[in-house]
Amino acid sequence: MVNYKDLGLVNTREMFKRAVAGGYAIPAFNFNTMEQMQAIVMAAVETKSPVIMQVSKGARNYANATILRYMAEGAVAYAKELGCAHPEIVLHLDHGDSFELCKDCIDMGFSSVMIDGSHLPYEENVALAKKVVEYAHQFDVTVEAELGVLAGVEDEVSAAESHYTKPEEVIDFATRTGCDSLAISIGTSHGAHKFTPEQCTLVNGVLVPPPLAFDILHEIEKKLPGFPIVLHGSSSVPMDEVNTINQYGGKLEAAIGIPEEQLREASKSAVCKINIDSDSRLAMTAAIRKHLAEHPGDFDPRQYLKPARENMKKMYIHKIVNVLGSDGKLAE
Ligand code: G3H
Ligand code: 13P
Ligand code: ZN
C-alpha cells in the first residue's frame, strides 16, 4: 500500500475549489509514454499550472501500471528539477470500470480515480460509485463519477450513442454517492471524429459542429452550485495537425473536434476539469510523420520523438494558457 502523499502528488479537492471560484479549468491530459509525461510536466511548469496526469485502463495495459505510477512519481521530481518548488500534480485513473481497478490504483499511489458507471442503470451506477467513494475517502483520494453517456468510440471507451445528463438526477446522484466531481454529457465525445460532416454547418469553408448543450450545463450548475463538473471528450482536433498527418501519408478523414471557444466558455463555469487525449495523439503523430518524411534516413527514435515531444508541449501550453486559463494558478 502506497499513499500518494508520500509520492508528492495531490488530490483534486483544493485545486477544483479554486478553479470553480476562479472561473478556469484544470487540464487533464492522458499519458502512455515518457515523452507525453515529459511534455505535460514541462508545460505545467512553464505555465505555473496545476495539472492532472491521467491513466486509462488501456494505458495500464500498454505501459504497465507500475511503470506509469513510477513515471508520475518521477513527474513530481522532474517538475521540481525544472524549478517548480511546489508542483500540484494529480495522478488520476481515467474511466475506471470496476471497484477492483479503482482500489488497485488507490493502493498503488493514485491520488484520484474515476469510476465510470455511466453505462449502468441509474441505481447500479449510484451503488458502484458509492462503494468506490467509501474506499477512496479513507485515504483522502478524490473520486470522479459520471452521469449521462458520451457518444464516440475509443479503444477501451465506447458508447454508440450519447445520452445527455439529466439535470433532475444530479442532486440525488452527488448526495448519495458522495463523489467529489461529476462528469457530464452535454455533447462532447471521445476520439478525433466527434461529429459527422452532415451534423456540421459549413462556415467560410470550415465545418462547424453543433454547439454544446450549455443550457443543460447551466441547469446542472443551478442544482449543484459550486460543485466540480468535468468534461470528457474535449479535444478540439486542430486542422493544422490533421492536415500535416494527411500531407505526410496519413489518412484521417472527417476529423472534427470541439471548437476551443466553447471549451473556453465552459471553463469559466463550474466545469473545472477538461479531458484532452486525442489532441496529444494528433500532435505526436503529425510531428513524427513530418520528421520521417523529411528525414528518411533517420532511424534513432530520439530524432523523431524529440520534435513530437516539442509539438505536444506546445499544444499543452496553448490549452493551458489560451483555452482553460489555468496558467499562474499554482497554490504558492
Ligand atoms: O477517454 C479515453 C481516453 O482517451 C483514453 O483512451 O482507452 O485508448 O487509452 P484509451
Ligand atoms: P478526447 O478523445 O476528446 O481527447 O477525450 C479524452 C478523454 O475524455 C479522456 O477521458
Ligand atoms: Zn473520457
Image (cartoon, grey):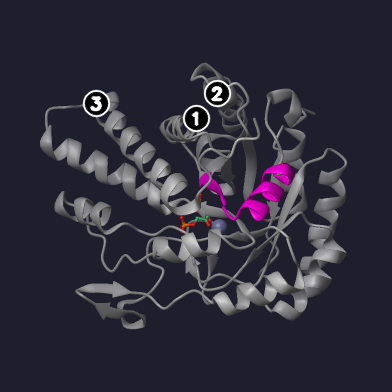
The picture quadrant where one finds residue 68 is top right
Residue 45's label in the rendered image is 1
Crowding around mark 3 (Cα neighbors within 10 Å: few <14, some 14 to 19, many 20+) is some
Mark earlier in primary sequence (3, 1): 1
- Tell me which amino acid carries mark 3: Gln
Q: What kind of element bears circle 3? A: helix
State the image coordinates of residue 50 (x, y, percent, origin top left). 58, 38
Question: Cα distance, mark 3 to mark 1?
Answer: 24 Å
Crowding around mark 1 (Cα neighbors within 10 Å: few <14, some 14 to 19, many 20+) is many
Question: Cα distance, mark 3 to mark 2?
Answer: 28 Å
Q: Is residue 314 left or right of residue 22?
A: left
State the image coordinates of residue 178 (x, y, percent, origin top left). 84, 58
Which residue matches tag 3?
303
Mark earlier in primary sequence (1, 2): 1
Residue 305 inside the magenta-drawn segment: no
Q: Is residue 41 left or right of residue 98?
A: left
The magenta segment is 12-29
- Tell me which amino acid carries mark 1: Val
Which residue matches tag 2?
84
State the image coordinates of residue 99 (x, y, percent, origin top left). 77, 52
The picture quadrant where one finds residue 73 is top right
- Tell me which amino acid carries mark 2: Cys
Compared to 38, does 240 lie above or below?
below
**Which of the two marks, 3 or 2, is nearer to us in this view?**
2
Residue shown at 80% from the left, 29% from the top: 1
Q: Is residue 205 left or right of residue 159?
A: left
Q: Are marks 1 and 2 in contact (CB under 8 Å)?
A: yes
State the image coordinates of residue 173 (x, y, percent, origin top left). 80, 69
One can see residue 95 in this view: no
Residue shown at 44% from the left, 45% from the top: 321
